Amino acid sequence: MHTPSTAPPSVPPRLHGWRRALVWAAIAAVLAAVFALYLQPDFMVTLANQVWACF
């Protein structure tokens, strides 16, 4: 008879130190790029117009 394991098989293996740092660096870069867009007034006007066009 099959004995159930303690962890489901879909759990990914833990990332090693440098891979984890690389993932966090990529996340930080994406967030920095998004926040940099908010500093541009033209982008903010375009975004506001697109949101307003939804209504």
Image (cartoon, grey):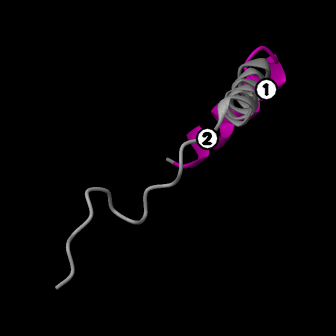
Of 27 and 10, which appears nearest the observer? Answer: 10
Q: Which residues are magenta?
A: 37-54
Amino acid at dot 2: Leu
Image coordinates of residue 47 in percent, x first then y, are: 69, 34
* Secondary structure category for the residue under label 1: helix
Residue 37, above or below 54 = above
Tell me where residue 43 sits by quadrant: top right
Q: Is the residue marked by circle 2 packed among few (<14), some (14-19), or many (20+) residues within 10 Å?
A: few
Q: Is the residue marked by circle 1 packed among few (<14), some (14-19), or many (20+) residues within 10 Å?
A: few
Residue at 71%, 20% in the rendered image: 35
Tell me where residue 3 sits by quadrant: bottom left
Of 33 and 25, which appears nearest the observer? Answer: 25
Q: Which residue is mark 2?
A: 15
Residue 22, above or below 32 = below
Q: Quadrant of the N terminus?
A: bottom left
Image coordinates of residue 28 in percent, x first then y, are: 71, 24
Q: Residue furthest bottom?
A: 1
The label shown at residue 33 is: 1
Image coordinates of residue 52 in percent, x first then y, are: 57, 39
